[in-house]
């Protein structure tokens, strides 16, 4: 029963991780409210958490020998609550929205490391691979719920979308009683040389940077695309974003089994899905086609992420497992965080529609890199 209760706590904690996408469906309305602000800056409202999470994740990887992961996860949920609700009360300047996103990013950085590491602490290799896939499903499912709430609450006034973060109160209550305590990571003795991060983990991390860099093009630009192609407003944008997270929820449930059957070839398979999704977005003329394209992207994201966490955890040892997860997570989320700025710079001559085609072309090159990397011996 304790193991079942622990799984409930872990999945409930995962449910809040992608809630930083809550204002995604009202980004176009936010841009209208701040006409003097660049589009890339407005898009940072949903990517700033990933940027802040990078440094936090690396720091947390060093703190797990001293603090139990349950304690850190509960603290992270308090940051989610504070950062999520802050823009509801203070939204007169775009800087206030970015500050709230930064506070939320502290919670994200803690959560990204501690939930995956806690799964490995409490369950064996076979079960942890399955649970990481299910975790990805709950991450996507939570993102879908928060996106839907944000879209519905923000239909009249966009700042009301941030009230969706009141749901974190219920999540915090569940985790207080259900999360397993876990164990402290091994401390390095005086004079002991730290265990190096394996080369394979670095490969996954660098690949993750570019995958996240280009997959984020969907969530960052789809609200504008919906309005440009006259497909609707915030509600329709939330449907397009929810299709991404819904497919990710389904794919996450299957990832554990897929890893068991095809192993590391799951990485080029995920990149191939992303390439198909971005190509379909470019040719989509109706909302249902856009939602279908989002499903390909969401499946790619929720296949790649748990696979990367799983292999990073397995290649690491007991004393640097959290550090290996932190390296993969930090590099990947850095790609997500800087995506609006990098894509805006690289594709400045392109229209919003053409950015999706440019991302599809990038995934062709990433597929070749992923296929080459997985053909090599671990």
Image (spheres, rainbow, N blue to C red):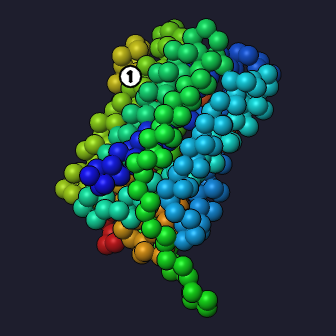
Residue shown at the point (43%, 19%) measured from the top left: 239
Decide: is 281 above or below 46.
above
Residue at figure coordinates x 48%, y 47% from the top left? 176
Q: Does residue 335 appear in this view?
A: no
Helix or strand or loop: what does disc 1 sit on? helix
Asked if residue 34 is positioned above or below residue 326 in the image, the reply reads above
Tell which of 36 and 177 is nearer to you: 177
Q: Nearer the viewer, residue 242 or 287?
A: 242
Q: Is residue 59 above or below residue 146?
A: below
Q: Nearer the viewer, residue 219 or 163?
A: 163
x then y, percent, for residue 358: 51, 36
122 left or right of 261?
Answer: right
- Is residue 177 left or right of 43 when viewed as pictured? left
Q: Position of residue 271 (x, y in %)?
A: 38, 46
Evaluate whether residue 126 shows in this view: yes
Q: Position of residue 19 (x, y in %)?
A: 52, 34
Q: Label 1: which residue? A: 291
Determine the residue positioned at 49% across, 25% down.
147
């Amino acid at each position: 029963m304790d193991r079942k209760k622990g799984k409930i706590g872990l999945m409930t904690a995962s449910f809040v991780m992608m809630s930083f996408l809550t204002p995604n469906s009202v980004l176009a309305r936010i841009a209208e409210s701040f006409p003097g602000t660049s589009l890339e800056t407005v898009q940072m409202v949903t990517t700033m958490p990933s940027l802040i999470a990078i440094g936090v994740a690396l720091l947390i990887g060093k703190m797990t020998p001293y603090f139990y992961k349950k304690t850190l996860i509960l603290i992270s949920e308090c940051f989610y609550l504070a950062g999520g609700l802050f823009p509801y009360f203070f939204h007169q300047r775009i800087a206030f929205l970015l500050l709230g996103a930064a506070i939320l990013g502290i919670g994200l950085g803690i959560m990204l490391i501690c939930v995956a590491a806690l799964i490995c602490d409490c369950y064996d290799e076979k079960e942890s691979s399955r649970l990481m896939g299910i975790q990805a499903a709950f991450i996507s499912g939570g993102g879908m719920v928060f996106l839907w709430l944000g879209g519905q609450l923000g239909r009249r006034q966009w700042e009301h979308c941030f009230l969706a973060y009141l749901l974190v109160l219920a999540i915090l209550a569940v985790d207080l009683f259900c999360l397993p305590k876990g164990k402290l990571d091994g401390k390095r003795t005086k004079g002991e040389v730290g265990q190096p991060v394996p080369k394979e983990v670095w490969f996954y991390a660098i690949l993750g940077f570019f995958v996240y860099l280009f997959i984020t093009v969907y969530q960052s630009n789809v609200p504008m695309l919906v309005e440009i192609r006259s497909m609707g407003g915030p509600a329709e944008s939330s449907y397009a974003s929810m299709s991404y997270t819904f497919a990710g929820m389904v794919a996450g449930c299957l990832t554990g089994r897929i890893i068991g059957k095809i192993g590391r070839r799951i990485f080029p398979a995920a990149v191939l899905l992303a390439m198909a999704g971005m190509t379909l977005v470019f040719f989509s003329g109706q909302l249902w086609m856009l939602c279908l394209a989002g499903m390909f992207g969401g499946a790619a994201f929720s296949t790649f992420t748990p696979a990367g966490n799983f292999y990073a955890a397995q290649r690491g040892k007991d004393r640097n497992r959290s550090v290996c997860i932190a390296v993969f997570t930090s590099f990947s989320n850095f790609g997500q965080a800087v995506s609006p700025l990098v894509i805006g710079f690289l594709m400045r001559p392109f229209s919003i529609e053409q950015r999706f085609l440019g991302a599809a072309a990038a995934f062709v090159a990433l597929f070749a890199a992923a296929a080459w990397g997985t053909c090599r011996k671990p």
